[in-house]
Amino acid sequence: MGEVRVSLADHSYSIYIQTAGLRQIGQFMQALSCSKKALIITDGNVGPLYAAVVTDSLRAAGFAPQVLVVAPGEGSKSLATADRVFTTAISSGLDRKSPIVALGGGVIGDLAGFAAATYLRGVPFVQVPTSLLAQVDSSVGGKTAVNHPLGKNLIGAFYQPRLVLIDPLVLDTLPERELKAGLAEVIKYGIIADADFFAYLTRNAAAILARDPAALTAVISRCCQLKAAVVARDERETSVRMLLNFGHTIGHAVEGVGGYAEYNHGEAVAIGMAGAALLSSRLGLCPPAASTAVQQLLTAMGLPLTAPGYGLEELLGYLARDKKVVDSKINWVLMQDIGRVMVSADVEVKQVRAVLAQLT
Ligand code: NAD
Ligand code: ZN
């Protein structure tokens, strides 16, 4: 079993990475000294596959679990669905020590986390992430949110879980496209912080795509370590946490122009990372070989590098509206080499245009 400790100013918790760990969730949660009533939030894809294992384990550990199944997809990250969670919690008599358990991908984690942060001003929150993206990214770090019709993730809270339990075996049932989307964020960690890990990914791309359990466990553990280290240094995203936005500036623009429909988040971030790498090398910040290595790894993992047919002006319009803009300047996360990035607010628009022209 792997354990990654997340140490924050006011509290610390563990991320356990454990093959077949789902069956032991009850034992893990016993250590948290919560009340017995527990509310599991899951979606219509994950619930039928894994809710029974989790409820059996919780019952065996003395809990009285209840399951709320919401519709799969981003649409469930809404105040309306959060309200369903609150109604279930209130009508079942959940108290201030009753745990809310997120069993699902990032949508469920963000929704359940938001509900846990706000129900009774905060109840114990447990993350059981089941998509690769959730295991390496959204379940670590304490950002929770729901969407508003006017924008994504606008209503939320920083709220840390008491425990994160990751079972790599659940990735067996994850659709191929979702696996690859998670791999985009995995590659990002290599680029921003760990050249050796980037090399490991390059060497093991085939095994990872074939869902080799040992390779996936190694990947998840390393990503959790890297994200935990960044979050420990900057819980509220005022400094180094910004580096996690590598590839996300152009990525968000691609998602926006495509109406969040054509490319999923990971694919858009892959295009954004290819763009950020090109921009870095164009500006002379990194060797051209580093940019090429990024493109090659993205391709090996089956991810897109370009968004053909997308309008350059439209993308620029989205870039200007991105929330990482401070004082109307875009804070670009750029590559100095594989494993090393920097933030720059001094990138000329003509350079950005030139790169976008290569991507579209
Ligand atoms: P998701 O939760 O929609 O999951 C993707 C799909 O895979 C869904 O259809 C889901 O039902 C299915 N699925 C999940 N696990 C499965 C499994 N083991 N077997 C079969 N099917 C499975 O999406 P996601 O990509 O996991 O997360 C995206 C969300 O995460 C977005 O809303 C994004 O804003 C959020 N996010 C949050 C943070 C954060 O720091 N809080 C970071 C990154 C992303
Ligand atoms: Zn992302």
Image (spheres, helix red, strand yellow):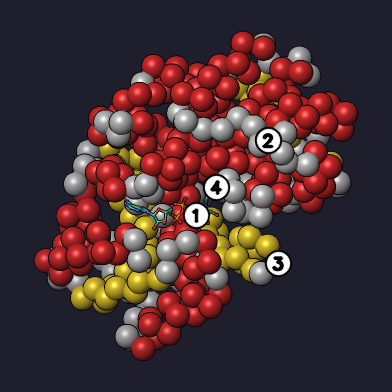
Callout 2: SS: loop
Instruction: Name the front one of labels 2 and 3.
Output: 2
Q: Between 228 and 338, which is closer to the camera in this rendering? A: 338
Q: Earlier in the sequence, mark 2 or mark 3?
A: 3
Question: Disc 4 designates what residue?
Answer: 264
Question: Disc 3 designates what residue?
Answer: 150
Which residue: 65% across, 41% down? 251
Callout 4: SS: loop
Query: Is the shortest distance between ligand 1 and the CB of mark 4 under 8 Å?
Result: yes
Q: CA distance from mark 2 to mark 4?
A: 15 Å
Q: Amino acid at mark 2?
A: Pro
Q: Earlier in the sequence, mark 2 or mark 4?
A: 4
Instruction: Name the front one of labels 2 and 4.
Output: 2
Question: Disc 2 designates what residue?
Answer: 308
Where's the N terminus, which quadrant?
top left
Instruction: Name the front one of labels 4 and 1.
Output: 4
Question: Disc 1 designates what residue?
Answer: 142
Figure check: 129 above or below 210:
below
